[in-house]
Image (cartoon, grey):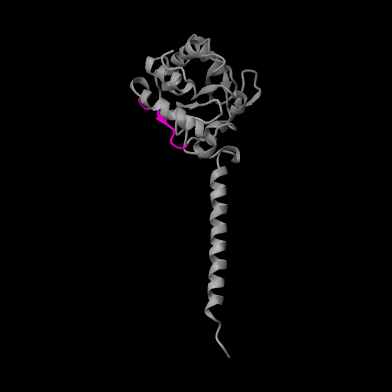
Amino acid sequence: MNKPTEPVKSSNRGVILAGLAGAAAAVAALYVIAGPNGNIASAQSCTAALSAAAAAKPHAKGEVAAFLPASEPLGLKTLAFKGPDGQDLTMEDFKDKTVLLNLWATWCAPCREEMPALDQLQADLGDDSFEVVAVSLDRGGPEKPKKFLDEIGVGNLTFYQDSSNGLLKDLRKVSRATGLPTTILINEEGCEVGTMYGPAHWASGEAKALIRSTLGKEGA
């Protein structure tokens, strides 16, 4: 009886390679969509944020020297928290506005120290194109963080809260927000421009220059 010919082996090898290629494609697809709420966008969806990150990079100095411009920006539209009246919000609700998203809590001493500067930044640069979104992660109700903000005279920031800490958990899934405070600059398309770990003097000239570069208002 004749032995199987070589073309049969080649055919089997082709089937195996095709199967491996399909599996690799499936893994790649899962990698692109994995993240907060299963819907973090890939860097390909955030090309404009790459340009903004490049514009911000020369301004990452002085008080904001630790700001890290994103090399592979994440899409953060699905990040969720509560508004001033307890309503559900996501970053999608800030569409067409650049946002400085700050995660803080009253038990975090560096967070408390930088809050007046964040309030001043909102007073100086806040408008229809830019907002400081400081989200309290205090457990329980809003009474404690609101009392703290009142005591230190914060009057320009809108109150946002996530007592479930779901926002922090979602960001940790994609290696962001390793601790508090964490501050993420997000462009008008909901994409990460860069991230700052630790406190900063956000009302400083360097911080304002960094924000203005993202807004396309350098020298304004």
The N terminus: image quadrant = bottom right
- From this viewpoint, is residue 197 visible? no
The C terminus: image quadrant = top left
Q: Picture coordinates of residue 92 (x, y %)? A: 61, 28
Q: Is residue 5 above or below residue 171?
A: below
Q: In front here: 149 or 93?
A: 93
Quadrant in which residue 53 is drawn: top left
Mark count? 0
Q: In front here: 53 or 141?
A: 53
Q: Picture coordinates of residue 127 (x, y %)? A: 54, 13
Q: Picture coordinates of residue 82 (x, y %)? A: 61, 24
Is residue 67 magenta-colored?
A: yes
Q: Is residue 15 above or below residue 107?
A: below
Q: In front here: 110 or 37?
A: 37
For the record, the magenta segment spans 65-72
**Most common secondary structure along the magenta stretch:** loop
Q: Picture coordinates of residue 45 (x, y %)? A: 55, 37
* Identity of the residue drawn at 59% across and 41% down: 38
